[in-house]
Amino acid sequence: MTVEAGELGEPSESTTVVVIGAGPAGLTVANLLRRSGVDCVVLERRSREYVAQRQRAGIVETRAVRMFDSWGLADRVLGGIPYDGILEIRVDGETHLVTDSDGSEGPQARLCPQQVLVQKLTAAYLDDGGDVRFEAADVSLHDLTDDRPTVRYRAADGTLRTIACTFVAGCDGDHGVSRTAVPDDVLTAHAFDHGIGWLTVLADAPPPAHPLLAVSPQGFAAHFPRGPHSSRYYLQCPPDDDPGAWPDLRVWDALRTRLGDPDLASGPITDSETFRLRSLVHDPMQYGRLFLVGDAAHIVSPMGGKGMNLALYDADVFARAVRGFVHDNDDTGLRTYSQRCLRRVWNDQEFSHWLTRTLHDAGDATDAGPFHRSLARARLDRLFTSPAAGGAFAELMTGLDPA
């Protein structure tokens, strides 16, 4: 890159794409652009150590695995355990096994915690000569409707810097600077509060044989693997509950009751927090030369594991659009980016909402009432007994549905 004096006197550089954020969305964008021969710079406000240890989702769906495979990256960036496609839904202690396999050939979903994916994406990008700048503070976006927008930031050494670019990929999440750089009257926010809280618990305890979702009169619970010797648990709770109200003994008692497993092995709890289940979609997902990717554009209830996978989908669509523009002077992908992404976003929002309501309403009827509880149980019965319902569920879980 050529370094010159910027208009404010700070060093000025030039690249094709500035990627804001080094989470799964940003690092996937960066790797795919690198594979496309498109230069980019990644700016991340946190340290590399912090980003690498951030705990989040654990299943990379089949569609996303095949996406990485199509770019020649699957073996490099997807660690973890191959997922056999079996999901256990336990209703009042009774086990029902459902599959998200649609019978198609090709790579299948992986159990891959976010921190593992981020670590491998970071290593792959840097090994290929990529440019990631951690601890980039005071990031600001300028002239986004011009042909050459600029991004300013303060480097880790305190130096103010400016990067001129052709596009900005806003991959810095729901509370990042990218979306706030868009004027208030440009985006329409569609928000929904599910009125449900979860206590999420990370513990050094044996993982389940299969990802487990449990329905009981005491409320929803879940148990997911997070490695060979660790587990992530979820417990339904009031939306504004205090994690301090959940001492270890109460957590394990509730899990054994709701999971219908009085012999559930416990272990040291290493992290716990409460959060509200909410959904949010911003439309459109672009403004001028800024393209919002992942959580910067949409938040999905965690039920169904769609949040990270939607971010990976956005990243793929964006990278292909930029590649088409740079190499073929074709702006079709850029013009249709928001429309294409939002079609999948709403499809996955609907599935996540359906699964959220079904598994919560089918348990504790205090909020839903007996009518909705019976409706939810009828949906589950159909899922367990109807091949057609099972096939539709598998399509949506794998991400291989037509959306």
Image: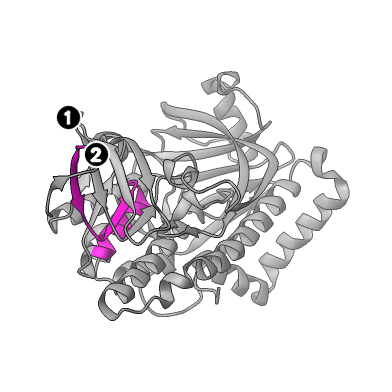
Residue at image position (67%, 72%) is: 389
Q: Quadrant of the C terminus?
A: bottom right
Do we see residue 123 in this rendering? no
Residue at image position (40%, 60%) is: 289
Element at label 2: loop
Task: Give the residue furthest to the front.
Answer: 7
Q: In the shown orientation, is residue 220 left or right of residue 345?
A: right
Which residue was labeled with disc 2?
134
**Coordinates of residue 136 in the picture (x, y in percent):** 27, 37
For the residue pair 180 and 88, the one nearer the viewer reads as 180
Q: Earlier in the sequence, mark 1 or mark 2?
A: 2
Residue at image position (61%, 58%) is: 349
Residue 157: mark: 1
Three-letter code, disc 2? Phe
For the residue pair 156 and 377, the one nearer the viewer reads as 156
**Coordinates of residue 6 in the picture (x, y in percent):** 21, 43
**Coordinates of residue 69 in the picture (x, y in percent):** 30, 71
Give the Cα distance between marks 1 and 2: 11 Å
Residue 25 covered by magenta stretch: yes
Magenta stretch, residue numbers:
9-33
**Coordinates of residue 152 in the picture (x, y in percent):** 30, 41
Element at label 1: loop
